Image (cartoon, helix red, strand yellow):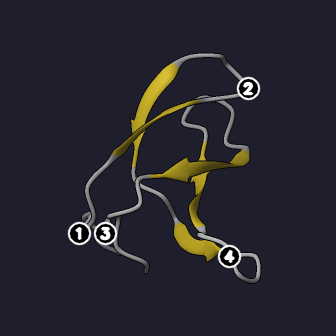
Amino acid sequence: MARKKTAKYPPVKVRDPYTGKEVELVPKKVWELKPKNRKGVKIGLFQSPETGKYFRAKVPDDYPIK
């Protein structure tokens, strides 16, 4: 029987676009979107707890990249 992974990273408060609710989730993946010669933003991939669909949202600049 497989054990459930415990989240090492802190949850982020984001708005679920499918349900419209504010939820605290841990992103599955985080990456930086950085155009040339400009400051970048960090984007996280989240999974909606109610619908199971994936969505992207901005995470804080000090969030660690997985």
- Who comes first in sequence, dot 3 or dot 2? 3
Q: Is residue 26 left or right of residue 17?
A: left
Q: Which residue is mark 2?
A: 18
Residue 5 vertical position relative to residue 43 in the rendered view, above or below: below
Q: Amino acid at mark 2?
A: Tyr
Q: Amino acid at mark 3?
A: Lys
According to the image, label 1 marks what residue?
8
**Is 58 on the left-hand or right-hand side of 54?**
left
Q: How far separated are the C-alphas under marks 2 and 1?
A: 26 Å
Circle 4 crowding by C-alpha within 10 Å: few under 14, some 14–19, many from 20: few
Q: Nearer the viewer, mark 3 or mark 2?
A: 2
> Residue 22: percent from the left, percent from the top?
48, 21
Q: Is residue 23 above or below residue 39?
A: above
Residue bearing mark 4: 34
As measured in the structure, the alpha-carbon distance from the residue carrying label 2 to the one carrying label 4 is 27 Å
Q: Nearer the viewer, mark 2 or mark 4?
A: 4
Is there a contact, CB below 8 Å, between mark 2 and mark 1? no
At 53% from the left and 70% from the top, the residue drawn is 30
Across and down, in percent, residue 34 comes to 68, 76
Mark earlier in primary sequence (4, 3): 3
